[in-house]
Image: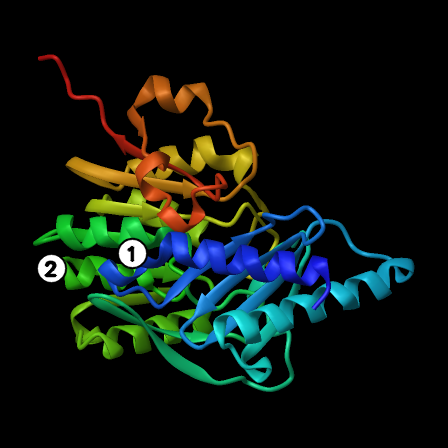
Amino acid sequence: MNSDSAAIKNRLLKNQKKLKSYLQKNKIEAFRLYNKDIPEYPYLIDIYGSHAVVYEQGKKIGDEDSIKRETHQNDIMLALEEGLGIKREFQHFKIREKQKGNNQYRPIETGSGDFFPINEPPFKFWVNLERYLDTGLFLDHRPLRQHLLENSKDKKVLNLFSYTGSLSVAAALGGGTVTSIDMSKTYLDWAYENFLLNNLDPKNHVFYQADVLKEVKKRKEEKESFDLIILDPPSFSNSKRMEEDLDIERDHPILIRDTMSLLAPGGILYFSTNKRKFELHHIISETYKVKEISQWTIPQDFHSTQIHQAYKIERILSKE
């Protein structure tokens, strides 16, 4: 093993040791182990039980760098195998480029890949490490899932852009009645299976396929209301299923305003975005009671990066 490969192996072991007590205490099987810690290795490495997902991050690497790229990937494969005992056939390498629309949700493999459950007590979630760029579980929302578990009892909950429904599962297990809305039937079906995996009866909840922007306006006109709303939209989407493009930097003031109209008195909206360098528009902070909660919604294994920004948004109570 050369000095560079030894460096990446040592870093993985160091990170694992640092996270060991946190992972064992919470019985967590899926977590971020490495986040571009060494500049020469601009990768992200997530662990899913006995598997590892390795994302190549940043700008595209040209042909002239292909040898270095291959060397680095071999170093990582060796480090994962020798350092963590993860077999090479359980190592999944992917290229994470800037995506437009819902490209991150489209199949990247011709095969279906294998689905298997990951434990995040008290939850279990189906993941697929091959078929899509993302795995079906956003690891950085782990603290929010625990928060929803503890704060959803007897509440009517709306999860917009619900993806595979991990946040919906958390709210439902916490005693809430959950409506999950997403454009993708594939991911709503996945959410349905996640409910079954957690011994939740899907018939007691709602899974609805729709253009979320259009559906929010429709339910606003129908004066429907929810006690708790989760709004975690993509940074950008130009899906053919949507009537209008979505750019969260540009559109979030209107999207949040329309979503807030669905909030019951005393209700809470949790808004989250992975948009880099996102700035909440002043009209939102001036119109509503807003508290940034990113500091506690980002888990320990993501401590070195601002993976998302999250806000708790409530109506300002009348002084009457």
* Point 30% across, 26% down: residue: 290
Residue density around tag 2, few if under 14, some if 14–19, many if 20 or more, within 10 Å: some
Q: Position of residue 260 (x, y in %)?
A: 30, 36
Q: Amino acid at mark 2?
A: Gly
Q: Are marks 1 and 2 in contact (CB under 8 Å)?
A: no
Q: Residue furthest right?
A: 64
* Point 40% across, 74% down: residue: 49
Circle 1 residue: 21
Say whether residue 129 is visible.
yes
What is the quadrant of the N terminus in the image? Answer: bottom right
Question: Does residue 109 appear left or right of residue 47 in this picture?
Answer: right
* Point 64% across, 48% down: residue: 38
What is the quadrant of residue 2 in the picture? bottom right
Q: Position of residue 171 (x, y in %)?
A: 20, 57
Q: Position of residue 21 (x, y in %)?
A: 29, 56
Tell me if residue 32 comes above or below residue 314 in the rendering: below
* Point 85% across, 65% down: residue: 67
Q: In terms of depth relative to the viewer, which is nearer, 287 or 258?
A: 287
Question: Does residue 14 appear left or right of residue 318 in this picture?
Answer: right
Q: Which mark is residue 106?
A: none
Between discs 1 and 2, the one toward the N terminus: 1
Q: Nearer the viewer, mark 1 or mark 2?
A: 1
Q: Position of residue 267 (x, y in %)?
A: 18, 38
